[in-house]
Amino acid sequence: MNQELFEKGLATRKKVLGNDYVEASLRSADDFSKSMQELVTQYCWGDVWNRPELTHKSRSMINLAMLTALNRTHELKVHGRGAINNGMSKDEIKEVLLQTAIYCGVPAALESFRVAREVFKELEV
Amino acid sequence: MNQELFEKGLATRKKVLGNDYVEASLRSADDFSKSMQELVTQYCWGDVWNRPELTHKSRSMINLAMLTALNRTHELKVHGRGAINNGMSKDEIKEVLLQTAIYCGVPAALESFRVAREVFKELEV
Amino acid sequence: MNQELFEKGLATRKKVLGNDYVEASLRSADDFSKSMQELVTQYCWGDVWNRPELTHKSRSMINLAMLTALNRTHELKVHGRGAINNGMSKDEIKEVLLQTAIYCGVPAALESFRVAREVFKELEV
Amino acid sequence: MNQELFEKGLATRKKVLGNDYVEASLRSADDFSKSMQELVTQYCWGDVWNRPELTHKSRSMINLAMLTALNRTHELKVHGRGAINNGMSKDEIKEVLLQTAIYCGVPAALESFRVAREVFKELEV
Amino acid sequence: MNQELFEKGLATRKKVLGNDYVEASLRSADDFSKSMQELVTQYCWGDVWNRPELTHKSRSMINLAMLTALNRTHELKVHGRGAINNGMSKDEIKEVLLQTAIYCGVPAALESFRVAREVFKELEV
Amino acid sequence: MNQELFEKGLATRKKVLGNDYVEASLRSADDFSKSMQELVTQYCWGDVWNRPELTHKSRSMINLAMLTALNRTHELKVHGRGAINNGMSKDEIKEVLLQTAIYCGVPAALESFRVAREVFKELEV
């Protein structure tokens, strides 16, 4: 493992997903899931999310769209929180999801509207 | 059909995808595909793409991500041209596609890199 | 919004999905989800579902197949109820799902059999 | 292999997809693909397609919807021919594909409209 | 139904998924799901899983990969138990899932790590 | 970039996919695709493919299954060659693809049989 990249990635991951969420995720890691945590923290957060050419807000925007298309509800919820942390307004989130209705189909968008409302409720925004 | 919404949608569609492409698409429409052209021009272009809360550049950005996730190569090429028309730089397109490698997987991203390079070659950008 | 198309769509949506379900869905809509409700009611229910060239029963049949393929369990349950409302028998639903085993794979079909059984239990059919 | 089921399946497969297509497919089979031909002819055609509870026309209808959702263009073309052989009109095919635009998204439906037009051209219908 | 193939399939299914699971699944089958149970037991378990050219352990390995790619969480859990029954170690399961992170994307792999940990906890391995 | 990880990854990538293929791929890389080449060579090939807990043959096996499920024909062809290089026999490839027919559906498996036959023809195996 590249410790420096891991540390850089961890900092970005905490900034986007929230310190508590990431700490809990690391605490619950065991031998089985440790390699996955290391891979994701380096490759996803240390490398791609830290590239300066796109803002974190833009990266959140495209994540909401992709996770809707991929039907990955659990991660959509995680990145819905990230989107708020990265400065997306509720109206901007709504617009991204309306556009998914056209390109991914109505059932995909309806699911993401449900998830987004849960996130807003939990964050009280 | 709502003629006013259709006209508004047609103007946006031409601005994004290019006048020549849209004219050719309409000319080639026959009785079979006409209802589809009308549906798409009204709802996708007249309604969603005309909503002011997101810029066309942001809409292109999330389309590149979604079309990669959905494995829809033909439309990705169409919207790759749209992305350039809407002001995305090649570097911004690259960043979106690098992020798809993380979330949609490497084979999805590699396919979109190939498509993007074809678009750049055809547009000589 | 086109109020006339919305009203027409709402009537069809209630006929297919049941008055109670649709009323509850509208009551729970807030500012965030209102645009989505309007888009879907016009575009999906007012326009496509109201086209006379296919019966509602045929439309239910292809929806069960598509929602299985797309792995959209929540909407499958909604449209499972719709299928009964539109006159599909349990045997016809079974046949559609058996065919999804061949084309979408066994795990997709097994999931839809589970959902269909829940629907039948709730509707006591 | 169950020879009787294979023969029954082969007859149905030829009725739906056309004698020439199936003969060519069998002639081109080699040791590598033979087991797959046997599996498909027995289970898909001998078993599921021969169940009497749904008409072949209904089976074609749901196949067009599923293959659009699954993004399987090659098989969609094969089953587009099957749909015509099983008595679907061009208008009915159009309706199924318009409905896929709502549930599977616009890019999926546009691809299937292109495939359907190729089929109609080749069959001169 | 081919009774001999069904019996052969049932034995393999019990060996892989466990006697209790399969007995419970058969007991809960009703008229609606019986045809599906018969189709799967013959075609999937009697035919493909009984082919001698791949070990059951290899078949489990590719199932974990496919079910992750297909986003079929329920069946992944069933086949996670099967993988342990067929002799995969926890480390081998981890390696398959790490590879899905590259090819299917990080959200797909994270979901499968969660499912695998639930399986290990239930089996106390 | 981590040069050491890149070099290790490059060696593995060449061993699996063939020296000529990888050299051509690197030669054709431009500024646009260079970051993607670096990302993939480090994480996919340098990191995951080099982990010793699974043989390269097992990794090829699960790749054929995943790429079929994901409908990624281009990469399937690349990894079909890799599978032969890593010691899979044609019979083993056939078995993996037969199993995809059950879990991913018949259209997915038929596509992969076509791709595999092209690979065998090109490699004259």
Image (tube, coloured by chain):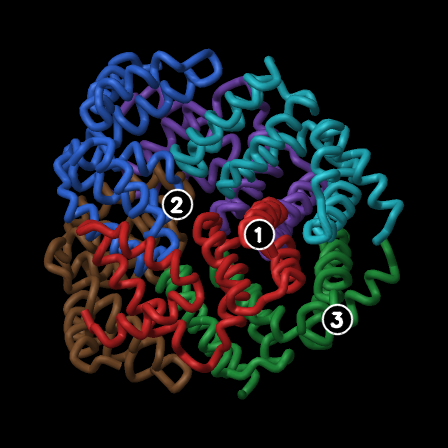
Chain colours: A blue, B brown, C red, D green, E cyan, F purple
Q: Quadrant of the N terminus of chain F?
A: top left
Front residue of F87 and D92: D92
The residue that disc 1 covers is C116
Between marks 2 and 3, how big is the CA–CA gap?
36 Å
What type is the residue that disc 1 sits on?
Answer: Ala
In the rendered image of this protein, does residue D28 appear above or below residue A110? below
Three-letter amino acid code of the residue under disc 2: Leu
Mark 2 vs mark 3: tell me if same chain.
Answer: no
| Real-space Cα separation, disc 1 to disc 2, in angstroms | 24 Å
Q: Which residue is mark 3?
A: D12
Task: Please indicate, yes or no, whether residue F33 appears anywhere in the rendered image.
Answer: no
Task: Give how far apart the Cα atoms at labels 3 and 1 are.
Answer: 29 Å
Residue at 20% from the left image edge and 67% from the top image edge = B47
Relative to E89, say whether D43 is above or below.
below
For numbered disc 1, what is the local secondary structure?
A: helix
Point out residue A30 in the picture as x, y percentages from the top left corner.
44, 12
Instruction: Please give the residue where the numbered disc 2 appears in the rendered image.
Output: A70
Label 3 residue SS: helix
Query: Which residue is painted at 56% across and 23% down in the image?
Result: E119
Residue lying at 29% horizontally and 47% vertically, measured from the top left: A113
The x, y position of residue D48, in whole percent, is: 71, 61
